[in-house]
Amino acid sequence: MTELGELGLSSYEEKAYRTLLVTGAVTAAELSDTSGVPKGRIYDVLNGLEARKLIWRQSSDPNQYVAVQPETVVDRLLAERAYELKQEWDRYREKAETVRSNLLPTPPTESSFWLGSLGSDEMSTALQQHMRTAESVVKAAVGPPYEDATWETLQSEVEGFFKGANTDLSVDLLFSEKAVTVLPDRFPHLIENQPADITVRTTPEIALSFDIVDNVETTIDVLHPVSGEDRIGVIGIKDSQVVSEFEQYFQRLWTDAVPLLE
């Protein structure tokens, strides 16, 4: 492809324009003979160039055509390409948003299930979106299957959890003693740097991992039926009775727990 072709001219348009730079004002028939653009195409080519203000037509009988100066033509072609690229960029951004939305797990309604293993990108994103629904209070109990994982596996989920928390949020984190062993040495520093008001406690044992958002929704980790060291997904429930039961269970654990960070 030629340089003018890269800027948006077809081969016939380029032949016609370059010929006009040499010949000066000529008729369409003369330009066809000189440039090699077929007579059946010459008027379409000239009309296109004129519409883009790359040539201009002299009023005469017959009409004659003159090339606009190259500096101006290049600027106009560049502006056209820049506009086209912006339109293409906007189209790709819209497509990316659509794809991203389609890839995200569907947020829970009354009762929904999200598939997602520990540390997966899907669950990291889902946790972030889940936390953004919280307005005042989140209570989270961390036990199985986190207890047998590594920090490298859990880091993306923990970061997604905190990233979704707003500055006015109160967060109570309750870890089983075994889950505490998974946390890195820098965990206290990670907590201190969060904008939300976070309290962390530990208790000897937690039956399963779950959280409660604003006392209106609970999400529960479902252990993998084959691999006890992973989960198959998370179930989200908004049934008030179920949420109340988990709230009471959390409060019993929290009351007997001890502070993890002084």
Image (cartoon, helix red, strand yellow):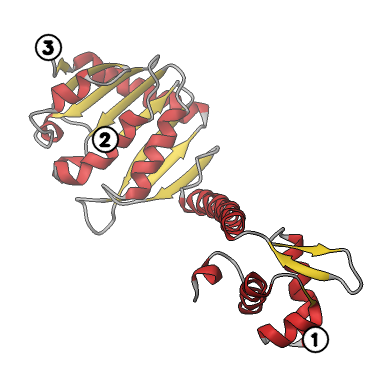
User: Up-down: is 1 above or below 190?
Assistant: below
Q: Position of residue 255 (x, y in %)?
A: 24, 14
Image-based side of 96 in relation to 67, left or right:
left
Query: In the depicted view, which residue is nearer to us: 165 or 117?
Result: 165
Query: In the depicted view, which residue is nearer to us: 149 or 38?
Result: 38
Query: In the depicted view, which residue is nearer to us: 55 or 142?
Result: 55
User: Up-down: is 195 above or below 129?
Assistant: above
Q: Is residue 231 visible?
A: yes
Please identify the residue farthest to the right as the structure is shown: 61
Q: Amino acid under label 1?
A: Gly
- Mark 3 crowdedness (10 Å alpha carbons): few <14, some 14-19, many ≥20: few
**Measuring 42% from the left and 48% from the top, which residue is drawn there?**
114
Q: Is residue 208 visible?
A: no
* Cα gap from disc 1 to disc 2, whole angstroms: 68 Å
Which circle, 3 or 1, is nearer the viewer?
Answer: 1
Earlier in the chain: of badge 3 and badge 2, it is: 2
Earlier in the chain: of badge 1 and badge 2, it is: 1
Q: Position of residue 117 (x, y in %)?
A: 30, 51
Q: Secondary structure at mark 3?
A: loop
Q: Position of residue 84 (x, y in %)?
A: 59, 56
Q: Which residue does the numbered mark 3 point to in the structure image?
A: 262
Q: Count the labels in the image.
A: 3
Query: In the depicted view, which residue is nearer to us: 125 or 49?
Result: 49
Q: Secondary structure at mark 2?
A: helix
Q: Amino acid under label 2?
A: Val
Q: Secondary structure at mark 1?
A: helix
Q: Amino acid under label 3?
A: Glu
Q: Position of residue 85 (x, y in %)?
A: 55, 55
- Numbered circle sitting on residue 40: 1
Q: Which residue does the numbered mark 2 point to in the structure image?
A: 158
